[in-house]
Amino acid sequence: MPTDKKQPIIVKRIKKGGHAHHGGAWKVAYADFVTAMMAFFLLLWLLSLVDQNKREGISDYFKSPAGIQGPGGASTSMIKLGGAMEIAKGEKNKKQPEEAKKVIVRDKDDKKRLEDLQETLRKAVEKSQALKPFKDQLLIDITPQGLRIQIVDKKNRPMFALGGTQLKSYTKAILKDLSKLINTVPNSLAISGHTDSKPFPKNYFREYYDEDYAGKVRYTNWELSADRANTARRELVKWGTSPTKITRVVGLADSVLFLKDKPRAPINRRISIIVLNKKAEEAIRVHEGKGGVSVDDAKTRLKGNK
């Protein structure tokens, strides 16, 4: 049957999409390209300012990034990146100066020598009839200056006569055996004397033949510690230690206490003998003037003192 109803007409409109968000993409790409070109030309400009050796260093870095040294350690690099990570030198600059190599080898040998001596001393203390009874009074350790041997006082077993510089018989035996062992290495020695904080009586004087002090001065822990260090030095020399091997003898009184919370404890009274490593020995010589001032400079300064 015919019907008057009209069929609905459906109009399909296809909306083209997928490219609507790309209208500005080329601008981003172009900006990246311009930035890269600027960086490239900046790199070329920077490279034109450095010499051939530095360019080789940069080239080597990109060939072998493992050439970085750090963090925080000494480096031989030419290009520093804030002190933490550094780029290695070029092939021509990788080799350290011969003198620097010798110092590195020397320090390694020196460390090994002192460590061996430390072990030898420990074994000797256990075996020696003179040292074993006093092993609790012998403190041996490695310090930044070298191998330190401390002979400390113990209650009822002092190294020296009370308030004096006369060595006890067993202290002489200890120094005799130590001298033999110390002489097996070429290293120099530094000797220091230490006291506790107990002061001398104010009216205690000793005679010194010095016109500036009219023959007498008040005796204190400074004099005592220095005199005891010198007594130890003489005893070591007596048993074969070369006088030229000893670079420093000092008295420190109670300025460096072993037990700060017990300033009058016997252990604070001690003699410290340091078998110096080469770095410490050189530092002493430079600080004391040897090697720190040229001969010509010294002669110039002394002209006015004649």
Image (cartoon, rainbow, N blue to C red):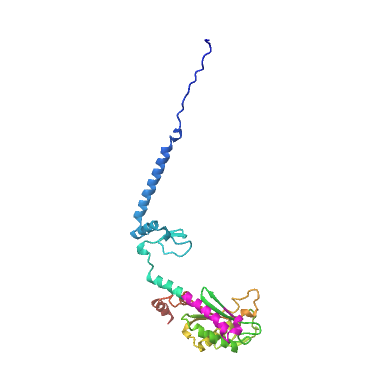
The correct choice, above or below, for 293 with respect to 20 in the image is below
Quadrant housing residue 81 = bottom left
Quadrant housing residue 91 = bottom left
The correct choice, above or below, for 215 with respect to 42 in the image is below
Q: Which residue is at the front of the view, 108 or 57? A: 108
- Point 35% across, 59% down: residue: 56
Residue 280 lies in the magenta stretch? no
Res. 175 visible in picture: yes
Could you tell me how many numbered marks the image carries?
0
- Point 46% across, 84% down: residue: 244
Res. 210 visible in picture: no
Quarter of the picture holding the C terminus: bottom left
Where residue 3 appears, x then y in whole percent? 53, 11
Residue 136 lies in the magenta stretch? yes
Q: The magenta stretch spans which residues?
A: 110-139
Q: Is residue 141 left or right of residue 49?
A: right
Where residue 9 appears, x then y in whole percent? 49, 18
Q: Is residue 213 left or right of residue 33?
A: right
Q: Which residue is at the front of the view, 287 or 181? A: 181
Q: Which residue is at the front of the view, 5 or 41? A: 5
Majority secondary structure of magenta residues: helix
The correct choice, above or below, for 147 with respect to 176 in the image is above
Where residue 200 appears, x then y in whole percent? 64, 83
- Point 43% across, 38% down: residue: 25
